[in-house]
Amino acid sequence: MFFDFETMRPVTQVFMFLLAGLSIASIISWVMTKVNKQKDYTELKQRINSWWIMIGIFGLALLMGPLVTVLLFAMLSFIALKEYFSMTPTRLVDRRVLFWAYLTIPLQYYWIATGWYGMFIIFIPVYAFLFIPFRMVLAGETKNYLRAVGNIHWGLMLTVFTLSHLAYLVMLPSEGEYQSLTMSGDGAALLLYLVMLTQLNDVAQYVWGKLMGTTPIAPTISPNKTREGLIGGVVTTGILAMILAGLLTPMIWWQGLLVGLGIGIAGFIGDVSLSAIKRDIGIKDSGQLIPGHGGILDRLDSLTFTAPLFFHVMRYFYF
C-alpha cells in the first residue's frame, strides 16, 4: 500500500523547505566552527547531524507508504518503552509482566494497520489496564504493588498509547478495510503538520527563552523553562500552524491558529512531564541513542501530549 502521488505533493513541498532549512543550519554551523575555533561546537554539530538522520528516516517511511510509517512508530514505541523501563525502578518479580507490556505494542499497531478504531482507542486504557494488574497479582508480591502497577500503566500510556496516535493519523482519511493499493496522502500531511509544529515549538520555546526569558515557570522541574519562552514559543507555533493549515490540513487559517496554540501548550506540558519523571529518578536524559539529543523519549516527550490532542480534534471535526 502506498500514498497517492498527487495528494502527497504538499508533503513533498514542505519537506523541501525543511531540507533547505537544515542545509542552511549545517552551513552556519560549519562557518561558526571556522570563525571561532576556540569554542566547542560539538553538541551543535551532533544535533544537526541527528536531525538529518531523523528527517531522512521519517521522510523515507512516508515515501514507502502508510504501513511502513505505522511500523516505524511501532519501533519507536518499543524503543521508548524500553528506555522508560530502563530508567524507572521495576520490581524483580514483575520482570515477566513486562513481556505482556511489550506485547501490547504489536497488538496496538495491528489495530491501526487494519483501521480498527474501536479496539485502538480502548485496548490499552481498558484491556491492558485490567490484565496487567491481574498478571501482577498472580506473582503474589504485595510490597510496592501500587507503585509498580502505576509505573507500568504510565509507561504504556506514555510510550505506546499516546504515540500510536501519530501512526493512526496516516489512516484517518479512510477507516476500515483497505482494498486499494493507494491511499490519500492527506493523513501523511496531517502527520507531517503535527510532528513539524511540535518539534519547532520546542525549538521556538528554547530560542525565545534564551533571548527574553527571565521568569522561570517550573524552577524545580526545568529551571531553563521561562514564561517568556513559553509564550513566545506558543505564539510562534500558532502563527506557523495558521500559515500551513491550508496546505497540509482541511482547516482554515483561524482554526489552524487555535490548533497551533493548543499544540504549543500541550507540547510544553509533555516536555515538563517527562522532565519531572527524570528529576524524580535523578537522571538528565532518558538514553543516549540520539547524539546531541539524548534518548528517543527526550525527543518525543512533547509529542506524547500533542499527538492525542491533535488526532482527536482532526477525527472529530474533519473525519
Image (cartoon, grey):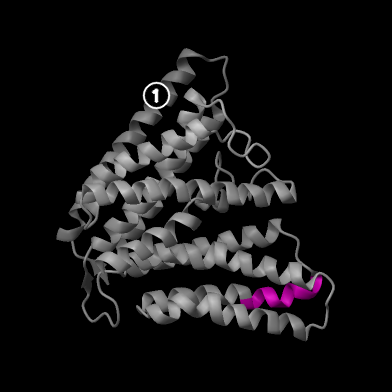
Residue 304: x percent and y percent?
A: 50, 57
Which residue is depicted at the point 20% across and 50% down? 247
| Viewport quadrant of the C terminus | bottom left
Label 1: few (<14), some (14–19) or many (≥20) C-alpha neighbours in 10 Å: few
Dominant SS of magenta comes to helix
The quadrant in which residue 21 appears is top left
| Vertical arrangement, residue 38 with respect to residue 108, above or below | above
| Viewport quadrant of the N terminus | bottom left
Task: Inspect this view and state whether residue 170 appears.
Answer: no
Residue carrying label 1: 28
Describe residue 129's horizontal placement relative to residue 235 as left or right.
Answer: right
Choose between 103 and 145: the one closer to the eye.
Answer: 145
Describe residue 124's horizontal placement relative to residue 150 as left or right.
Answer: left
Residue 56: x percent and y percent?
A: 38, 49
Task: Inspect this view and state whether residue 156 appears.
Answer: yes
Give amino acid for label 1. Ile
| Vertical arrangement, residue 171 with respect to residue 305, above or below | below
Is residue 216 shown in magenta? no
Residue 5: x percent and y percent?
A: 18, 60
Residue 296: x percent and y percent?
A: 55, 52
